[in-house]
Image (cartoon, helix red, strand yellow):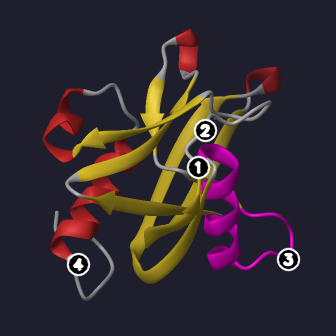
């Protein structure tokens, strides 16, 4: 389980940069894994603060993204991973933009919405933007 925030301000989207697989940096939504016993709302607020320096207020749940992947595991066994990600809409209410220190990301920045398709990014960025734009009642973007 993980929780993320879509923060859009003046046509700009807040993203964090992760080292990515093979050392190729990729842009991600600020957010991440829930700690044991943590409420998903609190997870998104905490993760945005850790990765960007901003304090955010979450105004609503945009939707839920579910993904399933299998990976090679030890001793020839496959690892079946199922991720459930809650995507909230967030608004910056304080703090100062800064990179995360000693975490999973190394930079935070605002990007023009029109420039996002040209960025190297994880698929969740596109899914979250679709949820933000479409606001489907089901919480799932249309196929």
Nearer mark to the viewer, of 2 and 3: 2
The Cα atoms of the two marked residues, 2 and 3, are separated by 28 Å
Mark 2 highlights which residue? 98
The kind of secondary structure the magenta stretch mainly shows is helix
Instruction: Classify mark 1: helix, strand or loop.
Output: loop
Part of the protein shown in magenta: 34-52
Q: Nearer the viewer, residue 24 or 143?
A: 24
Nearer mark to the viewer, of 4 and 2: 2
- Magenta segment: does it hold 40? yes
Marks 1,4: beta carbons within 8 A? no
Nearer mark to the viewer, of 1 and 3: 1
Q: Is residue 97 left or right of residue 7?
A: right
Q: In what quadrant of the picture does the N terminus appear?
A: bottom right
Mark number for residue 96?
1
Instruction: Classify mark 4: helix, strand or loop.
Output: loop
Residue 116, compared with residue 74, is above or below; it is: below
Q: Is residue 136 left or right of residue 36?
A: left
- Residue at 37% over, 32% down: 121
Q: Quadrant of residue 140?
A: bottom left
- Magenta segment: does it hold 104? no
- Residue at 66% over, 56% down: 49
Mark number for residue 135?
4
Q: Position of residue 57 (x, y in %)?
A: 53, 76
């Amino acid at each position: 389980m993980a929780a993320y925030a879509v923060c859009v301000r003046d046509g700009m989207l807040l993203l964090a940069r992760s080292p990515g697989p093979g050392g190729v940096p990729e842009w991600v939504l600020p957010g991440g894994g829930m700690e044991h016993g943590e409420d998903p709302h609190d997870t998104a607020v905490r993760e945005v603060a850790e990765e960007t320096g901003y304090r955010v207020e979450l105004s609503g749940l945009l939707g839920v993204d579910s993904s399933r992947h299998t990976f090679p595991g030890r001793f020839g066994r496959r690892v079946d991973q199922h991720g459930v990600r809650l995507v909230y809409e967030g608004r910056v209410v304080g703090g100062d933009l800064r990179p995360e220190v000693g975490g999973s990301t190394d930079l935070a920045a605002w990007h023009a919405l029109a420039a996002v398709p040209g960025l190297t990014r994880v698929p969740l960025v596109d899914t979250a933007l679709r949820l933000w734009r479409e606001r489907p009642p089901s919480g799932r973007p249309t196929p």
